[in-house]
Amino acid sequence: KQEVTQIPAALSVPEGENLVLNCSFTDSAIYNLQWFRQDPGKGLTSLLLIQSSQREQTSGRLNASLDKSSGRSTLYIAASQPGDSATYLCAVFTGNQFYFGTGTSLTVIP
Amino acid sequence: NAGVTQTPKFQVLKTGQSMTLQCAQDMNHEYMSWYRQDPGMGLRLIHYSVGAGITDQGEVPNGYNVSRSTTEDFPLRLLSAAPSQTSVYFCASSDYWENTEAFFGQGTRLTVV
């Protein structure tokens, strides 16, 4: 069974700092990997989708990388802002379902 | 474009009651799924569908039923609610292709007393 792990579980940084969130998965047979943001009491908002054949994707201050062979992905957030405070989830799609990590709770301190 | 719409947003049930959580999408997506989110356990798949008339079980299907009579709708039925079903439920949809993006509804917070 696919297992997805996110480290760290929680992270607190001062505003302006660059940071990296980590996601690892046990089975490299994935179709794609997606990073989501979840605000308290809200649904999931898609941030970046990396296709299985891609190595990275960028959107604004966000950059996600994928190393399928080693089962790892990172989400890089540049110049963090208080509005980035949220829980970040990664998920892999195996063709039948998405498998989610338990998320990294990020707090950006003004 | 409404995306994925879930109703209701909040619900309180008594043990043994039944109810249906509604999910509708307007993106003509083939793949739809239901997850429950519990503290410390992440999102777990309940049921999914790869098209109208086709459904299958996920990781935690017991106590839940689904049907997919149209592409747009994928309701989740709780047959006889139990306190263990207290959770936040999310519906998601995507094209059933290799490289497409999943869209989530805003969730239904269910409490069973």
Image (tube, grey):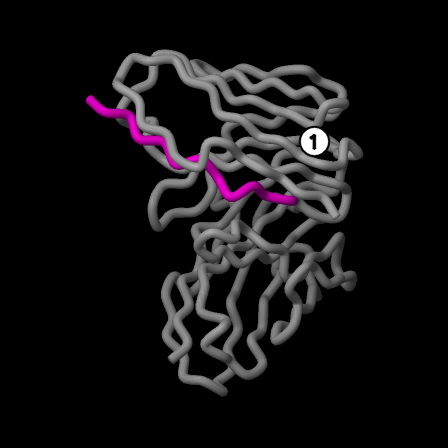
The residue that appears at 62% across and 35% down in the rendered structure is B101
Q: Is residue B7 above or below residue A43?
A: below
Q: According to the image, label 1 marks what residue? A: A32
Q: Is residue B76 above or below residue A14?
A: below
Give percent across and percent down for residue B53: 77, 63
Residue lying at the far front of the rendered structure: A8
| Mark 1 crowdedness (10 Å alpha carbons): few <14, some 14-19, many ≥20 | many
Q: Nearer the viewer, residue B10 or A38?
A: A38
Q: Which quadrant of the view contains residue B103? A: top right
Does the stretch in magenta take in B82? Answer: no
Q: Nearer the viewer, residue A110 or B80?
A: A110
Q: Nearer the viewer, residue B2 or A97?
A: A97
Give percent across and percent down for residue B48: 69, 57
Task: Identify which amino acid the numbered label 1 is placed on.
Answer: Asn
Q: Quadrant of the C terminus of chain B?
A: bottom left
The residue that appears at 44% across and 69% down in the rendered structure is B86
Give percent across and percent down for residue B74: 62, 61
Horizontal side of B51 relative to B14 (left or right) equals right
Q: Which quadrant of the view contains residue B75? A: bottom right
Does the stretch in magenta take in A101? Answer: yes
- Which element carries disc 1, helix, strand or loop? strand
Q: Is residue B26 above or below residue A79?
A: below
Residue lying at the far bottom of the rendered structure: B16
Q: Which residues are magenta?
A: A99-110
